[in-house]
Image (tube, helix red, strand yellow):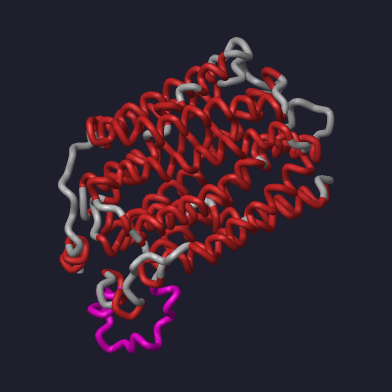
Amino acid sequence: MQQFLGLGHLFVTIFLYHYAVFMVIPAITDVTMGALCPGEDECGLAIYLNGFQQAVTGLGTLIVTPLVGNLSDECGRKTLLTVPLTAAIFPLVTLAFSRTKSYFYVYYVLRIFTGMVCEGSVHCLALAYVADNVAEGQRASAFGVLSGVSSASFVLGTLTARFLSTSTTFQVAASVGVIAAVYMRAFLPDSNMSSCSSSNSSRPTAKRKAKALPDADPSQENQIFSRIPSVEDITCLLRSSTTFLQVAIVAFFNNLAESGFQASLLFYLKAQFHFNKDQFADLMLIAGFAGVISQLLLMPILAPLLGELKLLTIGLFACWAHIFLYAISWSSWVPYFAAMFSVMVVFTAPCIRTIASKQVGTNEQGKAQGCISGICSFANVISPLAFTPLTALFLSERAPFHFPGFSIMCTGLAAFIAFLQSIMIRAAPAISTDKFINTSHMQV
């Protein structure tokens, strides 16, 4: 009973957090364009700044998220969740106060630094919390419900933005962000985690250090840096299971596609069809409603019947198809139709996380989810470097040929590669609690 109560409080926390974050998405493009290129529908500076922010944030989350996952395995999910929920408030407060050019740049810098802490960590910790409290056979449905809660917050946040002014939107978002952090600290019980001292004895990284440096005094080691997973740690985790390695590759290419697609889409729609905040909100509402229905109603039914692997393949194919439709949009109604593919696209993330979760022991859920989040963050670094120049070029008058959606079509290629890799994944039995630890010993 206490486990279900804890999951309920987690879902409320995640709902409030994402409600605050998603509420500002329809407005941020207009705010950016208004601050940097007032009165224009195409702005190369805005596109490049958005790409730079995405790349730097991805580089930061690549380092921070695996560290947060490791620390949460030792010291609890709630303690680590406090940091990103608090940090997310500051950028929202900045634009709630003013949206002039100066305040936009303050927001921009704050958004980069807080994004490093927030973007991967909240999702990683929430997934690990669910894995702590749900049996393996029910994790696909539970992860789907968690994603459905996020989709529901996306719908409500977008709907709220649709009827609020821009200034009020940021004020409400900042207030909800504060409520999310306070609610989490007041009501969310921590997972049943072992103490730091006891978990240290079972960490593969610590064992390798103890064996390699028998004369070292562990009490003199820097405890934080000793918990940062090295390349060797991540490589060992990837090599511990072929299935985990394959799903990590799928996660990389899927996130490469989704990251590039999301970074380019709003600028593309504004330049191609002159979309504004309200039309962005309408488009997001369609995708959000489709996601909520799928994750809260369809996925709990389909996951036990079809399994995570089949659902993953279906979701990745739908992802490629809807990106392709956006890229070749010949009329303003096509993006609305493409958004309905989200009913299947949303299968992807919960299935990736479920398959990864089953390949590690119960005391390494934070490590596994942090590793997948770190790989996704690495894709976030590469994606803007590859797709931002293409987006800026093909939305400008200097384009070598007329194809405004060319950069979006290229992101679809990454989604198709992820789809092909998912076909090659074969089901593997769940790994026992000690298997990865023993694998680490074998690597020494």
Which segment is the magenta one? Answer: 206-226
Q: Kindly tell me whether residue 218 is visible in this rendering.
A: yes
* Residue 363 image offset from top left, x and y in percent: 28, 64
Quadrant location of residue 418?
Answer: top left
* Residue 52 image offset from top left, x and y in percent: 62, 45
Residue lying farthest to the front in this orientation: 1
- For the point 21% across and 61% down, the residue is 436
Which quadrant does the C terminus fall into? bottom left
193 vs 280, left or right, is left
Q: Nearer the viewer, residue 412 or 103?
A: 103
Q: Nearer the viewer, residue 414 or 430?
A: 430
Q: Is residue 214 magenta?
A: yes
Q: Main SS of the magenta segment?
A: helix
Above or below 311: residue 19: below
* Residue 272 image offset from top left, x and y in percent: 67, 19
- For the point 74% across and 49% down, the residue is 171
104 vs 1, left or right, is right
